[in-house]
Image (spheres, helix red, strand yellow):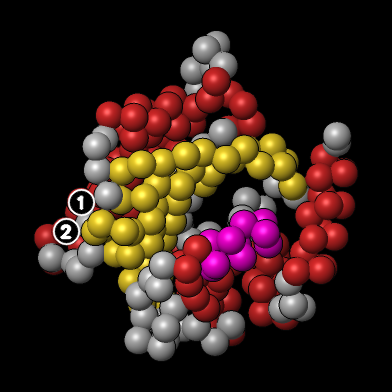
Amino acid sequence: MSQEQWSEVDDYLTSLLHDPDASLDRANEAALAARLPPIQVSAPLGKLLHLMAKMIGARRILEVGTLGGYSATWLGRALPPEGKLLTLEIDPTHAEVARKNIDAAGVGNSVEVRLGRAIDTLAALATEGVEPFDFVFIDADKPSNADYFAWALDHTHAGSVIVVDNTVQAGTVADPSATDDQTLGVRRLFDLIRDEPRVTATTIQTVGTKGYDGFTVALVL
């Protein structure tokens, strides 16, 4: 199959299983207009995150990597009225676009975009004594995946779910000749998960509008 076919199937399934959504469409358009990199999650993965958060009744969600606020909108909509989503973004332009998109989607009261290096923000949250999160979505710089995951493990609880995006890296993760920083970062994440008794996890390969990749889902025990 080709990229064209993968995209056609994604578009077909989205047209059947997703209601038309002007807010999400505008979020993508605003991100494109602001020249943000087109690396937001696909519509099917966005809805999967939404469904997973609702399935576990998540009330507190952490997202590492906001970009234009597309996935944050999906996750914010999964929250109950009293729920909160904290999303971390290093780039001021991305954060500004995200805040506008999140507000326009009507979930601004439930979502906080915090600006700064994620690893520094996470350290500050730990110092503040942040309450445990029910759901964590990690979609930021891949070399730091293991660091973000380790932090999440210490700030979630039994039954929490941690999702890490882009963990197949178009197959390079299994290629011993691939030694780029992104691939090495994903491998370090897998090594951590393999040796970590507090979680059980699996990784799913995916194809679609975003090409060939995959994501990892971990259940905190």
In the structure shown, which secondary structural element does the residue marked by tag 2 occupy?
helix
Q: Residue at x 82, y 68 (%)?
A: 15
* Residue 72 seen in this snapshot: no
Please tell me in which quadrant of the rendered image residue 97 appears. bottom right
In the structure shown, which secondary structural element does the residue marked by tag 1 occupy?
helix
Q: Position of residue 191 (x, y in %)?
A: 35, 27
Observer-nearest of 178 and 134: 134
Quarter occupied by the N terminus: top right
Q: Residue at x 62, y 38 (%)?
A: 205
Q: Residue at x 87, y 44 (%)?
A: 5
Which residue position is annotated with label 1?
154
Q: Position of residue 157 (x, y in %)?
A: 24, 59
Query: As displayed, is residue 40 above or below residue 56?
Result: above
Observer-nearest of 27 and 172: 172
Observer-nearest of 41 and 134: 134
Q: Which residues are magenta?
A: 42-51
Query: As displayed, is residue 108 above or below residue 40?
Result: below
Observer-nearest of 156 and 27: 156
Of circles 2 and 1, the one toward us is 1
Q: Position of residue 60 (x, y in %)?
A: 33, 71
Q: Amino acid at mark 2?
A: Ala
Judged by its main secondary structure, the magenta piece is: helix
Q: Residue furthest top?
A: 177
Q: Position of residue 134 (x, y in %)?
A: 33, 65
